[in-house]
Amino acid sequence: MEKLKIAMQTKGRLNEDSMQLIRESGIDLAVGRRKLVSEAGNFPMEALFLRDDDIPQTVADGVADVGIVGENEMLEKGENVVIAKRLGFSKCRLSLAIPKSMEYSGTAFFNGKKIATSYPNILQKFLDEHNIKAEIHVITGSVEIAPGIGLADAIFDIVSSGSTLVSNRLKEVEVVIHSEAVLISKPNLSQEKQEILDELIFRMESVQRAEGKKYILLNTPNEKIQEVASLLPGMKSPTVVPLAKEGWSSMHSVIAENDFWEVIGKLKKAGAEGILVIPIEKMIF
Ligand SMILES: Nc1ncnc2c1ncn2[C@@H]1O[C@H](COP(=O)(O)OP(=O)(O)OP(=O)(O)O)[C@@H](O)[C@H]1O
Ligand SMILES: O=P(O)(O)OC[C@H]1O[C@H](OP(=O)(O)OP(=O)(O)O)[C@H](O)[C@@H]1O
Ligand SMILES: [Mg+2]
């Protein structure tokens, strides 16, 4: 049987969440510090561990069939790959930033300036679209120190909380792209590999759907069922099971963790008792 080859980051920002998603999808991947290829024990998949910069090309060349990489890296490399699924983690943006002390009046600021970045292609495209002539200075890391040491006038780099910019006395002035981790694929997989990929995506979706959701069980007097049900949107409608105690029922449903405390107060007011909230591992519709 064919195996789907997946390229993943060896270590770094994407590694942990990628491994966790694969593991929660029920795929058993052995990992060792120096093990750069790993075969899944219970799923037709093989993982290749690489630097994130190399993942788009590895997929485009067909050395791997799919890969998990930041959308920013995928766009920068411009390889022939497609997004099979957006993964929702490693969210960040690529922004232009300038020293805090400088006045900013718009993109024309960058005319004649020197901009340090690890993303020259995305930056060049933005500059061209805005008719700006600037010099791009490529550095592979610690981009934020460039203005402070006189290497550049501005930077174009990853921003998430913004604290790296603050620590380096910079301010974000233009957001160029938003990014998150994506599952990329070669455009035309063999039918057999496409089927494995579809199964992988199905599993990932079941895991992600359950994220931030809780299973809730509670007891309520029968005359309060309607009122309590209106507070529990559930997957379709809540399950209602009679209790041995005359006139009472048990209700089961799903709630979003974010709504939890607000809903609990309302449920108690409506007469609900014995409320249990339980984690959900997977949700399949
Ligand atoms: N602060 C952040 N918050 C959220 N996501 C981030 C952040 N920094 C980076 N990312 C995302 O994670 C990806 C990988 O970042 P990381 O810093 O691990 O890359 P790297 O140092 O180039 O790793 P490698 O050694 O594999 O080349 C980035 O391309 C980006 O999509
Ligand atoms: O807006 P913030 O939340 O501060 O995040 C942005 C920083 O995060 C990343 O670096 P990372 O911490 O991964 O270090 P690196 O230099 O090793 O990539 C990125 O290169 C930025 O420097
Ligand atoms: Mg890298």
Image (spheres, helix red, strand yellow):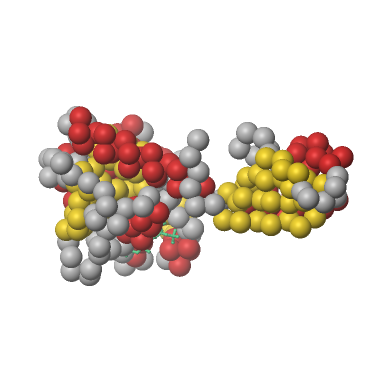
Is residue 252 at least partly visible in the picture?
Answer: yes
Name the one closer to the observer, 239 or 282: 239
How far across and how far down the image is residue 210, in percent? 52, 47
How far across and how far down the image is residue 140, in percent? 24, 59
Seen at 80% across and 40% down, the residue is 225
Quadrant of picture, ligand 1: bottom left
Is residue 141 at least partly visible in the picture?
Answer: no
On the rendered image, what quadrant is the N terminus found in? Answer: top left
Asked if residue 156 lies left or right of residue 239, the reply is left
How far across and how far down the image is residue 131, in percent? 33, 33
**Residue 198, located in which quarter of the rendered image?**
top left
Name the one closer to the observer, 212 or 221: 221
How many numbered marks have been drawn onto this rendered protein structure? 0
**Residue 192, located in which quarter of the rendered image?**
top left
Seen at 29% across and 48% down, the residue is 68
How far across and how far down the image is residue 220, in percent? 81, 48
Seen at 84% across and 42% down, the residue is 222
Asked if residue 110 lies left or right of residue 37, the reply is right
Q: Is residue 86 above or below residue 129?
A: below
Name the one closer to the observer, 144 or 3: 3
Seen at 66% across and 51% down, the residue is 216
